[in-house]
Image (spheres, rainbow, N blue to C red):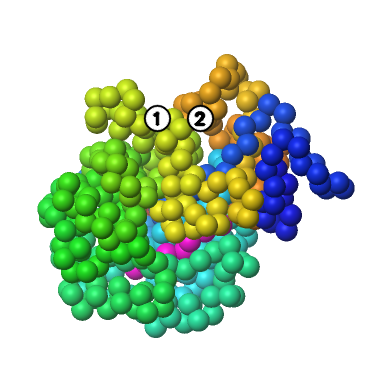
Amino acid sequence: MHVRNGEIVAVGREIGAPGVQVIVADDMIVLPGLIETHWHMWNTLFRSFSGDEQAHGYFPTVARYGANMTPEDMYHGTRLAAAEALNSGMTTVHDWCHNIRSREFAERDLAALTEAGIRARFSYGWAQGQDDKDPLNIADIEALHRDWSKHSNDGLITLGLGWRGMFRAGPLPENVYRTEFEAARTMGIPITVHIASRKTPPNQIEAHAKAKLLGKDVQLVHAVWANPDEIAMIRDAGATISLATSSDMRIGFGLPPVTEFLAAGIACGVSVDTSALIGNSSLFGVLRDVRDAENARTLNEFALTARRVLELGTIEGARSLGIDDKVGSLRPGKRADIIMVNTRALNMGGFVDPAHLLVGSALPENVDTVIIDGRILKQSGKLTALSTSQVVAEARSAWKACGSVRTGGRLVHFAHPVLRGYC
Ligand SMILES: [Zn+2]
């Protein structure tokens, strides 16, 4: 493969490119960088916080600590997530940022993505604890959109809307969901929404379709309880899906009808959703979960093949985000988002089928090289632009601070029982 100025210009066995820097890929599997399609990166700070009883479940935990966060905490949470993403071979993430408490929260979160050098969609969402009757600060999103060139890291980061849709704990007022939706349409930015993750209220997707709130620019996240009529509505609207099978299983939402989505021709990406629930944010692990859960749901060993699920983690993920003209495959004309996976490790020995090896066996430490837009961000198994020890140490300081109660700027006590032992 020949890369020039961040673009793939040739792929083949014999390429004439004298005088270029050569990266030797002996015993490596070279593939498009993995594409993640919905991740609350900021709350990576709360990895392992989701406890074993209602009071410490994911939603109350994230709401409680999210309200305690400062813009710097957002930066540290998202930088930790971005470092983990690069380390495990993700070259694109969808930073689903739903704790924007002021402009500074958005800016510090974006600074973390920029520092990491990762390709991302940044979806501007609400603040944890915000009343569903309160609309988003649309003027702030519009201002960010106007100044986007300052935040886009030379086009690597794009802006979207993290929308609440028509339902959360209960229905949202129409003036809230419609105003936000139409503002995004006016700006021409894509929309993403959690939908039908729970069984009730039923027919959430149908409600959005009837209200004319689906479209090519709308990505539906979870969609576990999509019924056959609704799957047809998603297809007809040209909307896409972000599967969150790993977190769906962990939190008990159920299993999404992946085979039915794919049979309808709907673009489906895969997602981490949140490290607070799924723990380890390896997209290889997520891909395996998607395949294995779908095979279990359909009682069929062959429902989802390794090759097909690998496509969900690459080109289909790109389609789900509407960027398949740029990334997701290794073809001339595409941006150079490339990873190399080492097959010399103990867990990779016995190499016959690359797709099976990647989905079934690969771990983040097997990712040798990560290239984004032609820039090398992991080489010989080490991140090049970020210090792993610094990222972890500073994230730890941040979670110690926001895991406690702030009173007048003073830390009073750790509210989470798990944390008490560490203070
Ligand atoms: Zn989510």
> Relative to residue 10, is residue 297 drawn left or right?
left
- The answer to which of 300 and 409 lies nearer the viewer is 300
Q: Which residue is mark 1?
A: 305
Q: Is residue 15 above or below residue 62?
A: above
Inspect the magenta stretch and tell me whether residue 126 lies in it: yes
Type of the residue with mark 1:
Thr
Q: Residue furthest right?
A: 19
Mark 2 residue crowding within 10 angstroms, few (<14) / some (14–19) / many (20+): some
> Vertical placement of 46 versus 126: above or below?
above
Residue 386 coordinates in the image, percent (x, y): 66, 51
Is residue 139 placed above or below 155 in the rendered structure? below
Q: Is residue 111 magenta?
A: no
* Amino acid at pointer 2: Ala
Task: Give the percent coordinates (x, y) of residue 265.
Answer: 33, 47
In-image side of 382 versus 142 (left or right): right
Identified at 55% across, 40% down, the residue is: 88
- Which numbered circle lies on residue 161? none
Residue 52 drawn at (x, y percent) = 28, 38
Q: Earlier in the sequence, mark 1 or mark 2?
A: 1
Q: Going 58% across and 20% down the picture, which residue do you hit?
A: 351
> Can you see residue 423?
no
Majority secondary structure in the magenta region: strand
- Is residue 7 visible in the rendered image? The answer is yes
Contact, mark 1 vs mark 2 (Cβ under 8 Å): yes
Coordinates of residue 335 in the picture (x, y in percent): 62, 55
- Label disc, if present, on residue 355 of the rendered structure: 2
Badge 1 marks a residue whose secondary structure is loop
Find the magenta span and give its range: 119-128
Badge 2 element = helix
Q: Residue at x 68, y 26 (%)?
A: 27
